[in-house]
Amino acid sequence: MIRWFLVIFLLLVLISLFTSLLQKLGLGKLPGDIRFRALGREWFLPITTTLLLSALASLLAHHG
């Protein structure tokens, strides 16, 4: 279970680094991805995108 938390954390870091590229692909704008403004900054929580990419990574790991 800790491994999955680590995987999800790393995916969140990668998604935040590559947000502009992922938005061109349509990811990051899925229902369930949350954007809000607080403390003078825009925050982005890509919950649905993270779940989708985690499922894809899991499929690749099991079939690879």
Image (cartoon, rainbow, N blue to C red):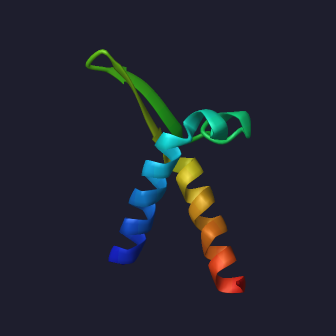
- Note whether residue 9 is visible: yes
The location of residue 27, given as percent across then percent down, is: 66, 42
Residue at position x 65%, y 37% from top?
Answer: 21
- Note whether residue 30 is visible: no
Quadrant of the rendered image containing residue 57: bottom right
The N terminus lies in quadrant: bottom left
Residue at position x 53%, y 39% from top?
Answer: 33
Instruction: Answer with left or right where residue 45 lies relative to residue 25.
Output: left
Q: Is residue 25 above or below residue 56?
A: above
Quadrant of the rendered image containing residue 55: bottom right
Outermost residue toward the top?
40
Quadrant of the rendered image containing residue 38: top left
The C terminus lies in quadrant: bottom right
Q: Is residue 51 above or below residue 13?
A: below
Work out whether residue 32 or residue 53 is closer to the camera in this orientation and state it: 53
Residue at position x 37%, y 67% from top?
Answer: 6
The location of residue 56, given as percent across then percent down, is: 66, 66
